[in-house]
């Protein structure tokens, strides 16, 4: 287990967080000298606190913070559920009235300087009399954007920025990317497991399992990092998934919303047996299901009454492009949940992922790679199936090396026999 | 640079060795407490010594050894060119007559106990009066196989085995795998660079460059680890390669032999311009070129006189399978070089690599993976091109997940934006 903790220090901190910490209950940060030291050590503790709070704070960023005095940990906290305390206030609530005086606060993101659902964190830090504040990533949110740091400095607090900045920016990717996109659409993260030759399933559609149990536990934990999971109807029929957080590596704090992309309303044509199985999986746990379907294909199915308690149809216009379709989903989400849809993890199938790639709408990838060659014809990433009578070159046009879709590799981890790649689109600064 | 050295400690030691050490002249082992310590520290030094001697000792294993007394390094050495000193004797030659008395010898492989081209290393170690011998990997070579350790113990030397054993076994893979295969054919290592969707080149055959400069420097250094490089004639025409060690990360100690797989003698039909370019590349440096061609297709080309100074034809029987073809190559090598062909690195193209995979003749993979999606039709690993009139399902049959070719992942490294995977066939114990 110590081995894993050491790996964690060295492999960096990707989009998902500190993987071995997720997977091994007893993995821990090594003492000074064997990895992080000084400020980095405490910032790593703040990142761990953030990981322990993964999920419920959305659309607020899940900030982690620790309070340290005389080299001793006073408190650790993460941003609470949306509308409740931010990490810094949660932290100060844990200590006695004068205990924080002269302490150092480590926080993964610049403290907020504005009143949202909560008053500014900067006020609380100033009032508590902390001596120093160490910050991971700047917060470019227009109402903060350096003002948080300025307020702290104006109050005589020593401020240091850029501590484990790369790691903190990676952790806060959904929030930061959403700002870059100006909230015009949800941040889209592709997640899949593949063999070395790019297959996500064999020619019979079987994909269980390409990756090993540690990868799957990590992938389950990741689900709660994102607001929703999107899968195509083909995957729904092939896997009959529940799309919940189950074998998670760390405790589950929320389920993501479920979204099924089914423009031709194939769900409406399923046999009663499959519908029954799907209903029991999809209804079992977690919040409501969004069924994305073209309006012209929608006829209210006979079983709809039963499903309408947990499923919401999202109507797509015929011929609308992906941006419009995502807009329709985001609007339905906002209407139902009264908060913006910030991030969507696309889990498959191959066709849906490839379509989104070609539309240049994937913002990050979390890929679980198996050192195996599968061979065969179907379910290969980057390639769409060619149907009878279609011109293969129109469906999968010739490609030149210089035009390849080249992502930025943030981190890679080895999880037993799998390699995890965490990458972001070059439109985002790293 | 310190960053890279730390990575090295954590990422393990794959088939190729300690990558960052290859790539960064100032990468170094960290002092005790920050990585290896005690015996592991010195064994890592022995592995470094082996890497510095990479190549010329073949078919002898390239052993690294260090001599340590009172926590101080006395000497470090690697096995010399074939027929010259083994690492342990080279080591003892570097110190004064009584200096080695009471010292500790760290060696990556069990010292030999038999007389080959050199007398046994055990005798030299015993005569020098060392107190302790720490061994990485056992040597299963029938004439050694535990006898080396037994002789040392019988002479009162304290012997410890299994120190960084996994790393030492990985380093000595070509030698150990050759013993497993009982020398019946060369050990075959597949090396290629690919995108995430399994493409080794774009649809125009362009592959320069999928991987970055650090990967390429590592790949060049790797070439001297293996006795020969094998490429298909398609790759020869597409890339006009010289197949030498050039932009290597560490000093070059040998060039590999060059082998071109060209059953239909397409080389004989090349234009004078291409032949001229190929000749200047292939003749430029390094040892002779083996041209593998079916006997029935061979007509001595008009330019053969010019080429015969550096090129040797290897005649293949029509309809012979891969094992026979490799046997023919090994026989030609033995005849020309008077030593066995122990290892061959297959560098492409896609078709040759895929054919060898399907024949289950690749023993290890060294894959440079780029986090990019290329798309397109051609040059995809695991898939053979389908020609006009051929049944696609006969050429690339349907595959079931359970039948996938699953390699063992020994190590993975991140080299800038690439990931290197080093894997071995499950027929070899790791």
Image (cartoon, coloured by chain):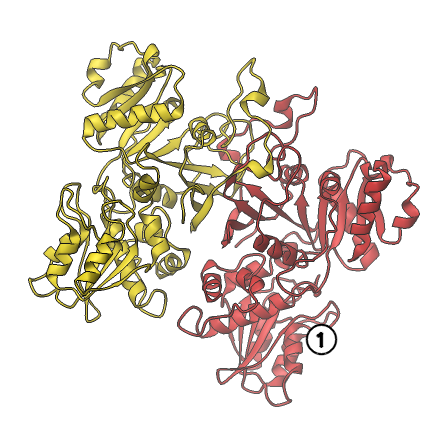
Chain colours: A red, B yellow
Q: Nearer the viewer, residue A120 or B87?
A: B87
**Badge 1, how many Cα within 10 Å: few under 14, some, many 20+?**
some
Question: Which residue lies under the disc numbered 1?
Answer: A119
Q: Position of residue B406 (x, y in %)?
A: 50, 41
Query: How many numbered discs sit on the rendered protein?
Result: 1
Figure quadrant of residue B356 = top left
Q: Is residue B305 above or below residue B19?
A: above
Residue A425 appears in view: no
Query: In the drawing, does residue B327 fall left or right of residue B68?
Result: right
The one of A345 and B133 positioned closer to us in this rendering: B133
- Is residue A240 rendered to the left or right of residue B74? right
On the image, the x and y values in percent for residue A358 come to 63, 37
Which residue corresponds to the image point at 22% horizontal and 48% vertical from the top-left? Answer: B53
Residue A129, placed above or below residue B122: below
Placement of A267 over or under A366, stated as above or below: above
Q: Position of residue A384 (x, y in %)?
A: 64, 31
- In this rendering, position of residue B199 left or right of residue B107: right
* Furthest residue in direction bottom, as rendered: A98
Q: In the figure, B34 relative to B362: above or below?
A: below
In-image side of B367 versus A102 (left or right): left
The quadrant in which residue B142 appears is: top left
Q: Is residue B410 visible?
A: yes
Q: Callout 1: helix, strand or loop?
A: loop
Percent position (x, y) of residue A210?
Answer: 59, 44
Q: Is residue B165 or residue B15 the one in the foreground?
A: B165
Query: Who is closer to the viewer here, B144 or B244?
Result: B144
Chain of residue at mark 1: A
């Amino acid at each position: 287990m110590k081995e894993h903790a050491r790996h964690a220090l060295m492999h960096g901190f990707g989009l998902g967080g500190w993987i071995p910490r997720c997977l091994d209950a007893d993995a821990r940060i090594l003492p000074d000298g064997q990895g992080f030291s000084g400020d980095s050590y405490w910032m790593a503790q703040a990142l761990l606190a953030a990981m322990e709070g993964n999920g419920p704070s959305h659309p607020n960023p899940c900030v982690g913070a620790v309070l340290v005095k005389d080299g001793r940990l006073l408190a650790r906290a993460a941003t609470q559920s949306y509308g409740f305390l931010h990490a810094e206030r949660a932290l100060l609530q844990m200590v006695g009235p004068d205990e924080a005086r002269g302490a150092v606060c480590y926080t993964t993101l610049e403290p907020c300087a504005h009143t949202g659902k909560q008053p500014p964190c900067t006020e609380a830090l100033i009032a508590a009399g902390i001596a120093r504040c160490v910050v991971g990533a700047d917060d470019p949110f227009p109402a903060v954007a350096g003002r948080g740091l300025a307020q702290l400095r104006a109050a005589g607090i020593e401020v240091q920025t850029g501590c484990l900045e790369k790691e903190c920016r990676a952790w806060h990717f959904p929030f930061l990317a959403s700002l870059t996109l100006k909230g015009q659409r949800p941040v889209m993260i592709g997640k899949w497991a593949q063999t070395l030759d790019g297959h996500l399933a064999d020619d019979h559609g079987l994909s269980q399992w390409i990756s090993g149990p540690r990868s799957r536990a990590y992938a389950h934990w990741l689900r709660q990092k994102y607001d929703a999971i999107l899968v195509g109807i083909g995957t729904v029929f092939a896997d009959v998934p529940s799309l919940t957080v189950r074998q998670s590596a760390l405790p589950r704090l929320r389920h993501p919303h479920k979204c099924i992309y089914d423009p031709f309303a194939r769900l409406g044509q399923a046999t009663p047996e499959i519908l029954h199985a799907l209903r029991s999986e999809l209804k079992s746990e977690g919040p409501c299901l969004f069924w994305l379907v073209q309006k012209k294909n929608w006829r209210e199915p006979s079983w709809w009454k039963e499903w309408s308690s947990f499923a919401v149809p999202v109507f797509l216009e015929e011929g609308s492009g992906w941006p419009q379709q995502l807009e329709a989903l985001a609007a339905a989400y906002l209407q139902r949940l009264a908060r913006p849809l910030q991030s969507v993890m696309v889990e498959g199938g191959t066709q849906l992922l490839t379509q989104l790639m070609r539309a240049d709408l994937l913002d990050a990838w979390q890929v679980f790679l198996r050192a195996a060659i599968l061979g065969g014809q179907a379910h290969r990433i980057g390639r769409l199936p060619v149907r009878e009578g279609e011109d293969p070159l129109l469906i999968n046009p010739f490609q030149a090396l210089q035009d390849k879709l080249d992502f930025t590799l943030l981190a890679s981890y080895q999880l037993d026999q799998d390699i995890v790649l965490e990458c972001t689109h070059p439109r985002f600064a790293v």
